[in-house]
Structure formats: structure tokens, C-alpha cells
Image: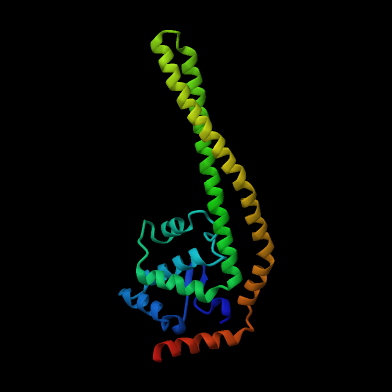
Amino acid sequence: MNLANRLFQIIDDEPVYDAVLINISCYKKLYMLDKSEDKNKYAKQLLFIWYICDPCSPYFNTENRIEEATKEVFGKKTKITKILQECIDEYKRRQSTPMIRAFERTMKVSDNMSADLARDTDQLGEWKRLTNDINQLMKELGSDPSDIEARLELMERKLDLETKIIKKSKDMADLIPKINKQVESLLDIKDKVDKDRMQVDSSDNKDAISNFIIDEFIERYE
């Protein structure tokens, strides 16, 4: 068993694990909570962990990976229990490296920035449509005192919208180079991440496996 698979493997969407995994405190608790003979619930929970945590998972880079993985594994919205979350955190701690985690954090920041930009674009479009609607309403008003008063009110609203449009456009212009910088950071560390993953997958890394078992022994009896 190499370092990359020291917790468990996924073969044809089925988890393959041994006694080492079950003896990890949080995984043991998760295992014992499943009272069924075939441990079907436990197997699904392991598959869920792999789906949302492993870079090789088909859901790892999806925008809503937790929701999509939940639907795929459980078929419905399922709450992540405290024990399941502990297992997720343990998987991340043992199955990744600082460089891989840095890559994931940078990717998350980039995704958040892109989402902000998309949301701002929608807001800006709506404000521009409202401005056009106000212009149309003002053209339809006459020169009666009530119409003049209505035009003045519409003009104030238009000026307010135009101020918001200018500020939002500036914010978006400032955000674009930040997104580009994040993308550059992703590309910059990608090679290092690939090397780290190769190290994680190395079948020669037996010392790490030994340390993993020793750490578990110490944690249990200290």
C-alpha cells in the first residue's frame, strides 16, 4: 500500500480499505456507527470523502462539489455530521501536502473572485436597464407641473444609478487584474503541485507509512 492510498482506495466507485483505516479514531467511530452487516453506509461515506477531497475525483474541481457529491452518493441532501467532518479533515491532513493545500486555497480564492465578478456583472446590467427605462419614462412625460416634478424625481434616481454604475465598473476593473494574478499564481505552483502529488503517489515512500502507524499508536496510548 503506497502513501497515496494509505487510508483507502476507490476502485469502480467502491472503497477498499484495511484494518489500518478502521483503527484511526474518527474512522473507527464512523465505522461503528454503521450497524448494518454489509457496512453499506460506511462505504458510501468513504466514497463521499474521496469525491470531495481527492484531486483524482471527478467532483474535485466542480463549483458545487459538496452538493453534487452528496446527490451522487446519498441521492438526497445529507448533513455532514461531526464525525464525518473529522474524517474529512483527517483525510485532507494525511493525503495532501502544504503545496497541494496552497494550490487548493489559491484556486478557491480565484473561484470566489470569479463569482464576485459574475455577480457584479449581473448587477451592473440591471442598473443599466433601469437607467434606460428611466430615460424612456422621462421622454413620455410632458411639461405639466406634475410631469416636471416626476421628471425631477426620475432624474435623481438616474443620477444615483449612474453613480453606482461608475463605482461598480471601477470595482470590476480593479478585480480583473487580481483574478489574473491569482491565475498566474495557480500556473506558477502547478508544476510544484504535480511533483508533490508524484511524491505522495510514490510506492517507495515506506517511511511515511511507518510514521503514520506509529503516530496512531502514540495518539492512542499517550
Q: How is the image coloured?
A: rainbow
Q: Position of residue 9 (x, y in %)?
A: 52, 74
Q: Residue at x 40, y 91 (%)?
A: 221
Quarter of image, res 150: top left
Name of the residue lying farthest toward the left: 35
Specify the quadrant that holds the C terminus.
Answer: bottom left
Observer-nearest residue: 99 or 15? 99
Quarter of image, res 40: bottom left
> Quick check: 155 left or right of 176?
left
Q: Position of residue 49 (x, y in %)?
A: 46, 68
Q: Position of residue 123 (x, y in %)?
A: 50, 37
Relative to 109, residue 132 above or below: above
Task: Residue 201: tell me if it is visible.
Answer: no
Q: Position of residue 217 (x, y in %)?
A: 44, 90
Quarter of image, res 32: bottom left
Relative to 32, residue 117 above or below: above
> Quick check: 115 left or right of 33?
right
Name of the residue lying farthest toward the bottom: 221
Q: Residue at x 56, y 68 (%)?
A: 101
Q: Residue at x 64, y 84 (%)?
A: 204
Observer-nearest residue: 78 or 137? 137
